[in-house]
Image (tube, rainbow, N blue to C red):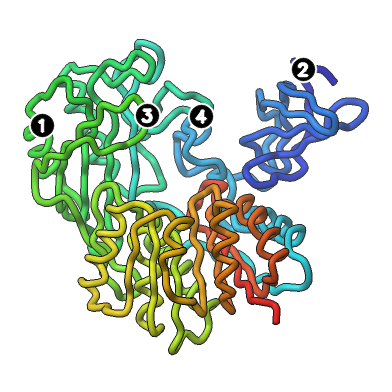
Amino acid sequence: MKKGQIYEGVIESVDFPNKGKVSAGEEGRTVVVKNGVPGQLVRFSVNKVRNERAEGRILEVLKPSPLEIEPPCPHFGQCGGCTYQNLPYEEQIRLKERQIKSMMDEAVKGAYVWEGTKPSPVSSGYRNKMEFSFGDEYKDGPLALGMHKRGSFHDIVNVTDCQIVDEDYRRILACTLEYARETGLSYYHRMKHTGYYRHLLVRKAVKTKEILVALVTTGEETPNLRNWADRLCSLSLDGRIAGILHTKNDSVADVVKDGGTEILYGQEYFYEEILGLRFKITPFSFFQTNSLGAEVLYRMARDYMGDMKDKVIFDLYSGTGTIAQILASVAEKVVGVEIVKEAVEAARENARLNGLTNVHFWAGDVLKVIDELNEVPDLIVVDPPRDGVNPKALERIIGFGAERMVYIACKPTSLVRDLEMLQGRGYEVERAGGVDMFPGTYHVETVVLMSKVK
């Protein structure tokens, strides 16, 4: 097998994250390809060749999988936002279940209870936050506003019929693109570092239906954006616009960053409700992007913690304190640690909003703050970023000797890596399960309960 060769084959299985396996060549070597589903007959090229397996790229789907359906989104396949919309939702759950169960079975030492993968309460229009990018549909083409084209860093797909958000998002998106085109100003070129329009951020609460909109631009030119805000306010929406913002960002990095925000209408925050608690959310604060799915996730974590009466709980990587506050209502005391200062400020304000006096938040790196926490927790919740827990921080966490620990992972491969150290230092896995927070994509949350071996 050589690089550049073209083969045909059936995708036999798909591992996390979205890695399809297909056999090719006389020797039947396994080639890993992305963006396929089990059962598809595909034509693919080989891009890399290694000792045991090779990597390839799908050129064409010659025959669909028996599992496939017509994707509900007309942008599927071109837009890089979703991977599994061509599978029925029940099949998406089964696929994710096989992926994380296989990884857990290999990682866990000893017997444990696998509790399956819980579906999202809704499988379409579930997102409460979207970051749309400005660009062009093709080189030197018309101004576009949407998602990055699959496999492309530059090209943007106008996702006018995106199905993972509701109609309010689509109307705000269309209105903003029309206004931007009328101004005649260019999008921000990521290579040239010139231009004006960068991103459109839209957040909408499921329970309160409040909407926050932020237009992110460079600081070079400023048209009368209040005209844009007036247009948004005149839209017929299911929700209610709480605030319209203009954020400037002159950073060369292609990320949504706050370099100064002006309020064009209303306020710079909105409210969402989770499991009976109310949370104030600002434009750039972290909050689970699937509100109804978050309730499933947090109920599961709370159930895993068991009896929390008279217990002290540490919530590490606490974000805006959602989990900490949900646990605080049934625990003696909860201490949250988060590195983002703005998130800690929001967490403290939300705790006051919910009348919780037994939850406290520390701002700082978990690795450094742990030494300053002059308490020994009975239980620990770890909900780290995608890369997992820093090994040195994990050593410190283990050093507390908490009787139970709940690890919430948005990236199963990082969880598997951290489980090796946790089990080697005296913890055993009791229960585990998945929660599908991201229908249509390969992403999935995994929750694990561990206990200290006595």
Q: Amino acid at mark 4?
A: Arg
- The image quadrant of residue 110 is bottom right
Q: Amino acid at mark 3?
A: Asp
Q: Is residue 333 above or below residue 415?
A: below
Disc 4 residue crowd, few under 14, some 14–19, many 20+, Cα 10 Å: some
Q: Indicate which disc, 1 or 2, sits on the residue closer to the N terminus.
A: 2
Q: Residue at x 67, y 26 (%)?
A: 57
Disc 2 residue crowd, few under 14, some 14–19, many 20+, Cα 10 Å: few
Q: Is residue 69 above or below residue 353?
A: above
* The N terminus - image quarter: top right
Q: Which is more toward the observer, 305 or 130?
A: 305
Q: Which residue is the site of mark 4?
A: 150
Q: Amino acid at mark 1?
A: Leu
Q: Residue at x 69, y 74 (%)?
A: 113
Q: Which residue is the site of mark 3?
A: 254
Res. 225 mark: 1
Q: Which residue is the site of mark 2?
A: 3
Mark 1 and mark 3: span between their CA atoms? 22 Å
- Asked if disc 1 and disc 2 are in contact, CB closer than 8 Å, the reply is no
Residue 311 appears in the figure: yes
Q: Is residue 349 above or below residue 60?
A: below
Q: Residue 383 appears at what percent x and percent y?
A: 49, 60
- Asked if disc 4 and disc 3 are in contact, CB closer than 8 Å, the reply is no
| SS under mark 3 | loop
Depth check, mark 4 against mark 1: the one in front is: 1
| SS under mark 1 | helix
